[in-house]
Amino acid sequence: MTEKITLLIVDDDQETRELIKRSLSDGHYAFIEAENGSAAIRLLNESQPDLIILDVLMSGIDGFEICRQIRKMDAGKHTPLIMMTSLDDTNSIEQAYEAGASNFITKPFNPTLLNYEIKFLLKTKQTSDKLRDTQRRLETAQRIAKLGHWEWTFNDNKVIWSEEICHIMGFPGSKTSAISHQLVTRIHPEDLIRVKTIIKNAIREKSAYSVEHRMVLPDGSTHNVIQEAEVFVDDNGNPVKMVGTLQDITSRKKTEDKIKTLAYYNKVTGLPNRTLLKRLLNKYLSKNNSKQPISVLTITLDRFKLITDSYGHAFGENLIRKVAIRLIRSLKESSYFSQKNNESIFQKREFDKPLTISHCDRDEFVVILPEISEVDDAALIARNITRALAEPYQISDQEIRVTASIGISVYPVDGRDTDTLLKNSATALYHAKRQGGDGYKFYTAKMNARAFERLTLETSLRKAIDEKQFILYYQPKMMLSTDQLIGMEALLRWNHPELGLIAPGEFINILEKTGLIVPLGEKIIESVCLQIKEWIKQQYKTIPVAINLSPVQLRQKDFHLRLSRILKQNNIKPDMIELEITESTLMNNMDKSITMLKKLRLLGTPISLDDFGTGYSSLTYLKHFPVNSLKIDRSFIQNVTVDPDDAAIVKGVIALAHNMKLKVVAEGIEEPAQLSFLKETNCDFGQGYHYSKPVDVKTFTKLFMQKDHQPPLLVRNDNTGYKK
Ligand code: C2E
Ligand code: MG
Ligand code: MG
């Protein structure tokens, strides 16, 4: 038997109620009756009828008011309600609908029509119940999935969205519409241009898109979302709206990251593991179009097993963590990294971790050195690593010393693919260990020989510093209009016990790569200060001395402080020295260099841009460099009298520099004709063999510092000091 339909009849007239009951006496209905509003509301709550028939005109509260109250109740919100009125006027009908009635009938009513009306309303209710149910289920599902949907109409630029979007985007309350740009404000600034471009393209191409991006909520938290949308067009094919979804995938992302960490990183040090290392090496190899050498360094500790056997596993892990930190620091400090100043390899990140150092297993680390300019650099870095790792470690009150061995393979000579390079690096490591550890070995014998040569030179340079084999030569700087001495440049010479004087071009490079230029550079400044003091003491006129500065020195954050300390200690005024910095140094690392130059300028030390014209700087950059003078490179001066291009360049540079209130020094003046040209073009100062080659301090003092040398002698000595 099918269940009966319960009808609530609300009418203060019993006869009408009976009439309705009789009209609907086909056995499908059960009736409950109320003769006023309050009874109706009570019965509604108790019996939950399927349909209500309500009379409009009743004593007490009228039917319209009862209808309004019913619609406010949970039990009556969606119940079909027919209003019954004897008044057949449109006003009552309108009022009935406004109060929330589903439909109305007029008295006297037609029983057949009433029957159909009831059936129709019940059917409609069934459909709308189903719809509401589906909607509710959808909302619940969307809430669980943190998924919201939105619709953006282009003509009014309005967006409406589901409640879940409010939660995802952190909009207060449950506001469900806004103008489109309010939504854009939540997109992470770094993702904004990308997302906007994708949306614009989708509208232009009338296509769908899917984009993952980050959002910043008002509480400052960052969330990951995925946005998918489709563009809809009108009959003419013009885009009219976009409908899309937005899903918060923050927790999924976190899980993915966790999985990635487990799969790609070593759990003791957090460094990339062998899997990630191989991927990265593959990437470097495939991207290496210029076929630059890439070195692979495999590093293990010597006798690590003995340490874990003696001190235990936890102690061993502790040590490995410290080794990793030292390794990273040593690589960062290697001038190789700082030389690649624009893009240190530590900035090449994937998954937010430095990738060039990987921790493969127990005490095994692998370092990739991509884009190294010389294979020798790999040897130098290996040496720095072994030195750094050999320093004592302090682990739980225990001082411990370990050494490391390194095997090096180099692309392309030792292999062109990841596996071969790793295998050959491991073989080289085996040889390094066999030689007693605490050292490195290349896979190829020839490279070992070259590294040895270089090591010998490095060792001699260290010894040369200790044994004070470096000396300074001085070259005068003249005022061209008067041929008067106005300054000098200190130039470094290595006075080798067997080889005699060696020019800086042969060793500066290695001093820089080993970092030895830093202590030596300070010694040079000190020695210039002492010389100035000596000249002052002997009552010679005080003439400023220019000192050449290496880019490695300039990169020291506290260089200005170190310089200032040396000057103060020697009681030398800052403008008694001048710093020469090559143009290419500035161009390589402009922002940092400019910051340091400004600090130096504040000290009061003039700065000169050396070798100007070779660093490819656009002249417009000049105004950003806080320098006092330019030294036009010798290569331009050499040909000023024969090459019209060089003559034009030199003229142009002088005019421009003067315009910017900079003084100009011409380097390498050798011929009187060159000097005449420079005088004509109003070049301020000059240096070169025409006046004098660089000479030792004794000669310089004799030739240029004598009080009665006005104007000084023109010295045409051939004594460079270098052995022929
Ligand atoms: P620079 O600073 O441009 O120095 C000028 C170079 O040109 C010097 O070479 C000088 O001897 C040479 N020279 C000067 N006049 C003439 C000339 O008329 N004809 C020719 N052919 N050459 C001339 P030097 O002394 O061999 O120095 C070479 C470079 O080494 C210097 O170029 C400078 O960049 C660097 N250097 C020299 N001393 C130091 C130093 O103490 N520290 C640093 N970091 N670098 C230095
Ligand atoms: Mg110079
Ligand atoms: Mg120069």
Image (tube, rainbow, N blue to C red):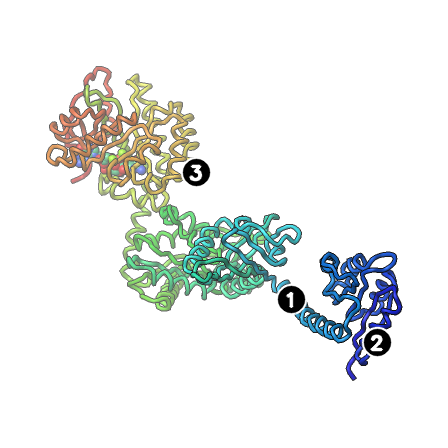
Residue at point 33% right, 38% down? 586
Which of 220 and 667 lies nearest the eye of the viewer?
Answer: 220
- Left or right, 690 with respect to 487, comes to left
Residue that numbered label 2 is attached to: 22
Q: Image quadrant of residue 630?
A: top left
Of the 4 image quadrants, the one containing the N terminus is bottom right
What residue did someone put label 3 on? 557
Checking the image for residue 683, the label placed there is: none
Q: Is residue 630 left or right of residue 79?
A: left
Neighbor class of circle 3 (other Cα within 10 Å; few <14, some 14-19, many 20+) is few
Residue, x 32% and y 19% (percent of image)?
Answer: 536
Pointers 2 and 3 in contact (C-beta within 8 Å): no
Q: Nearer the viewer, mark 2 or mark 3?
A: 2
In the rendered image of this protein, does residue 328 appear above or below residue 237? above
Which of the two labelled residues, at mark 2 and mark 3, occupies the earlier sequence position? 2
Camera-nearest label, 1 or 2 = 2
